[in-house]
Image (tube, rainbow, N blue to C red):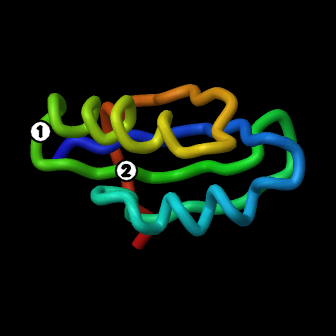
Amino acid sequence: MPEAIVLINTDIGAEEEVLNQLMNVEGVREAHIVYGVYDIIAKVEAPTTEKLKEIITSNIRKIPKVRSTLTMIVVETKLKQ
């Protein structure tokens, strides 16, 4: 299943509001408020790459108070056992 990590910048002070809205977006599996250059990181999954792109461009990027995003499509995953 295609997945991506999305790094999100929000308006100052809007991190929690955006985080709450992210959790209502189809395909968002987890999201975290973080310190650093970005304000939120989110893991997004979808049945196809096209659907993944649609979720990011039509849903996440259009959330009010999202200033910018950087998307990294996952190529390979390895889980610690």
Quarter occupied by residue 57:
top left
Crowd band around label 1 with a 10 angstrom C-alpha radius: few (<14), some (14–19), many (20+): few
Q: Is residue 34 left or right of residue 66?
A: right
Disc count in the image?
2
Q: Residue at x 78, y 54 (%)?
A: 14
Residue 16: percent from left, percent from top: 73, 65
Crowd band around label 2 with a 10 angstrom C-alpha radius: few (<14), some (14–19), many (20+): many
Quick one: which residue is furthest to the left in this view?
47
The amino acid on which the numbered mark 1 sits, given as a three-letter code, is: Thr
Helix, strand or loop at disc 2? strand
Residue 51: percent from left, percent from top: 17, 38
Query: Looking at the picture, does residue 39 appear above or below residue 21?
Result: above
| Quadrant where the C terminus is found in the figure | bottom left
Quick one: which residue is furthest to the bottom in this view?
81
Q: Residue at x 34, y 34 (%)?
A: 58
Residue 7: percent from left, percent from top: 61, 38
Residue 67: percent from left, percent from top: 69, 31
Helix, strand or loop at disc 1? loop
Q: Name the residue under label 2.
A: 44
Nearest to the observer: residue 21 or residue 35? 21
Quick one: which residue is furthest to the front in this view?
64
The amino acid on which the numbered mark 2 sits, given as a three-letter code, is: Val
Q: Residue at x 60, y 44 (%)?
A: 64
Q: Residue at x 31, y 31 (%)?
A: 75
Quarter occupied by residue 54:
top left
Q: Mark 1 points at which residue?
A: 48
Label 2–label 1 contact, CB within 8 A: no
Q: Is residue 9 left or right of residue 12?
A: left
